[in-house]
Amino acid sequence: MKPPFPARGWVEIDSAALAHNVSTIRAELGDAVEFCAVVKADAYGHGVDIVVPVLQAAGVEVIGVASNAEADRVRRCGFRGRLIRVRPGAADEISDGVPLGIEEWIGGPAHADVVRSVARRRRRPIASHLSLNSTGLSRDGWDVGAAGEADAVRRVFADESFDIVGVCTHFPREDADDVRRGTARFLLECSSVAPAKSAVTRHCATTYAGLHVPESRLDMVRIGAGLYGDTSALDGALRPAMRVLSTVTAVNSYRRGSSVGYDGWHRLEHDATLALIPLGYADGFHRSLSGRGEVLVRGERARIIDRIAMNGFLVDVTRIPGVAPGDEVVLFGRSGAECITSDDIERSHGHIAADLYPSWGQLLPRFAVQPTG
C-alpha cells in the first residue's frame, strides 16, 4: 500500500496487530495484574496518536510515558486514566507535568529532593513511584542494603510532599534466572521499607520478564516491546505492527570488478544488476547496515552491498528477474512469504532493532492501516 502523498519511503502501522497484541497479553497476564502500556519514544516509533486510541478501545487504564510532550499527546487523544513517567524527571518537567496528572518515578535520595522542592512550590503532594536498585541496574533508585538507605526510603513514605502510589525497579538483562533473583530481592526490599498494610503498586516486570517469568508480574507489568510485537514471547503469538517501505528508483547493470559506493567500498565479484533505494542514514537507516542488511524486492531478499549514504543505498537484484523503477521495497516487515524481522535487523545492525524504530517512525511519513488479509 502506498501513502496518499509522494514519499521516498513510509511507515505503515497495523492497528489490528496492536489490538491483537493488547488482547493477547492481557489474557496471558490475567485480571489480577494491571497492564501499563508504555508509549515512550513516540510509542517506539509507532505513533502515540495511532497507538493510544487502540489502547483506549481495549480499556487500558495505565500508560507509561517518558516525556511531557508524550503525556500531552496522550491526553489530547482523550485518555483520562493514569500516566506514569518511566524515568526520573527534571524539576521543570515534574512541575509542568502536574496539570497532566503524571505520576513521577523517583530515582533515589537526591532526586527525591528535586521532587520535594516541586511539591512545595506547587503546594501539593506529587504522586510518585519509588525506584529501588534491587536488580543491580544501578541506573537510578535507592540501594536499600547500604547504610541508612532503608530509613531514607521510609522517611519519603512519611513525607507529606509525596503521595507514594508505587514501588518499582527495572531488570538489566533478559535472563529468566536473573529476573527471578531480582524479583525476590525486590519483594524483600519492598517489605522492609513500605509501611505495613501499604496499598502501593509493586512493579518490576517489563515485556520479557512479564511474559517469561510469571512470578515477576506482581501488581503491574509495564509492557513496551510486546505491545508492538517486538518479542518472540508467547510462542510467536504477537504480531509486529510496523512495516517500512520504499520503492526502487533506478536499476542499472555493472560489470564484474566495478567499484560500488563511496570510497569504492565494495567491488563486484560478478556482473550485477543493482537497484537504488532512495533512503539512507538521514531516514534512520544506520550505516551499520551497510553490506549486511537485506530488503525485500518483489518478495525476494536482496542484500545491501554499498556503504549507506545520506539518502540512498544499493541492493543486488541480479537474481530477482524483472526488477524495475517503481517496484515496492520492504525494509522491515513482510512481503509475501518473506519477512525482514527484528532478529534480521539486530544481526545486521549489531544492536537491538528498537534502536532504529523511533527514527523510522519520526523521520518518515507514517500512517495506520487495517490489513484485510
Image (tube, helix red, strand yellow):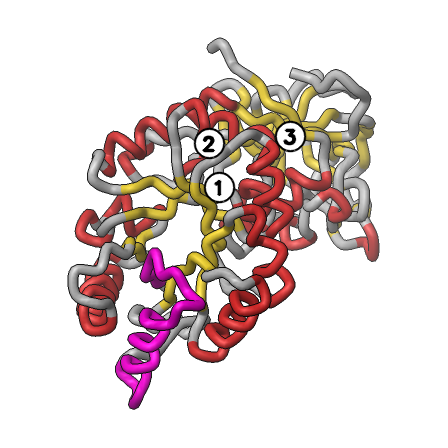
**x and y percentages locating residue 336 in the rendered image:** 51, 18
Assign a secondary structure to mark 3.
Answer: strand
Q: Residue furthest bottom?
A: 147
Residue 20 occupies quadrant: top left
* Residue under pointer 3: 11
Residue 133 visible at all: no
Calculate the distance from the C-alpha at mark 2 to the C-alpha at mark 1.
9 Å
Residue 342's label in the rendered image is: 1
Amino acid type assigned to the residue bearing label 2 in the image: Pro
Residues in magenta? Answer: 145-169
Q: Alpha-carbon neighbours of circle 3 within 10 Å: few (<14), some, or many (≥20)? A: many
Secondary structure, mark 1, is helix
**Residue 29 is one of the magenta-drawn residues:** no
Q: Amino acid at mark 3?
A: Val
User: In terms of depth relative to the viewer, which is nearer, 119 or 251?
Assistant: 119
Residue 237's image quarter?
top left
Residue carrying label 2: 240
Identify which residue is drawn at 52% across, 56% down: 351
Residues packed near mark 2 inside 10 Å, few (<14), some (14 to 19) or many (20 plus): many
Q: Residue 69: x percent and y percent?
A: 64, 47
Say if mark 2 contacts mark 1, CB within 8 Å.
Answer: yes
Q: Looking at the picture, how far across and down is residue 312, in whole percent? A: 79, 40
Measure how far apart labels 1 and 3 are at the Cα level.
15 Å
The three-letter amino acid code for the residue at tag 1 is Ser
